[in-house]
Amino acid sequence: MSESTPAFAKRKTLAVKSLSTVTRTRLLDELAVVTYDESALGITDVARVTGEQVSGISVAFLVVGSTTGITELRAAASAFPPGVEAIAIVCDPDTIPGMRRVADLTILTVGYLEDLQKSLARAVTS
C-alpha cells in the first residue's frame, strides 16, 4: 500500500531556470538539453514568472512546439509587463516557415534551426 502524496508536493513551483545568452553557441548548448516534463510550467506561467523576476527586458522570445495554440501564445505574451515586446517562435517541422502578426504578437514558425535565422532576419527588416 502506498502513502498519499503530501499537499506541498502537488503544488506548482513557480520558478524558471535562466539560460545563458552571452553567445549564440552557449544559448544553443543550453537549449539542446531542455527536455519536456509533465510537471513543468506552461508557457503562460513561464512568461509571468520571468516578467516578475527579470527586470529591464524589452524583448521576450516565447519558444514553443507545434501544439501551443494562438490563444495560449497571446495569453503568455500579455503576461509580461507593459513595454515588453513578445515574439513567439513556433517549432514545427511539418509546416512552411513564415511570419505573421496576431494583434500585438509576432509569430515566427520554423521547421529547422536554419529557418530561424532567416525568419528573424525577415522580422527585423519588416
Image (cartoon, rainbow, N blue to C red):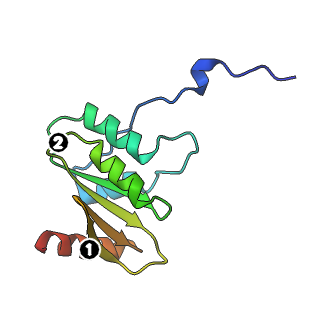
Q: Which mark is residue 82?
A: 2
**Image point 26% across, 38% down: which residue?**
51
Give the answer, above or below, for where 56 lies relative to 101.
above
Q: What SS does tag 2 mark?
A: loop
Badge 1 or badge 2: first in the primary sequence: 2
Residue positioned 30% across, 38% down in the render: 50
Q: Position of residue 3 (x, y in %)?
A: 78, 19
Q: Under tag 1, what secondary structure?
A: helix
Q: Residue at x 38, y 51 (%)?
A: 30
Instruction: Please name whichever residue, 58 or 82, is drawn nearer the observer in this view of the structure.
Output: 82
Q: Which image quadrant for residue 29?
A: bottom left
CB under 8 Å between discs 1 and 2: no
Q: Is residue 54 found left or right of 38 in the rendered image? A: left
Position of 75 with respect to 103 (left or right) is right
Can you give x and y, in whole percent of width and height, for residue 82 in the image?
A: 17, 42
Name the quadrant of the C terminus.
bottom left
Which one is in front, 114 or 101?
101
Q: Residues within 10 Å of mark 2 (few under 14, many from 20)?
A: few
- Residue 120 is situated, as x and y percent measured from the top left of the image, at 22, 69
Q: CA distance from mark 1 to mark 2?
A: 25 Å
Q: Which residue is mark 1?
A: 119
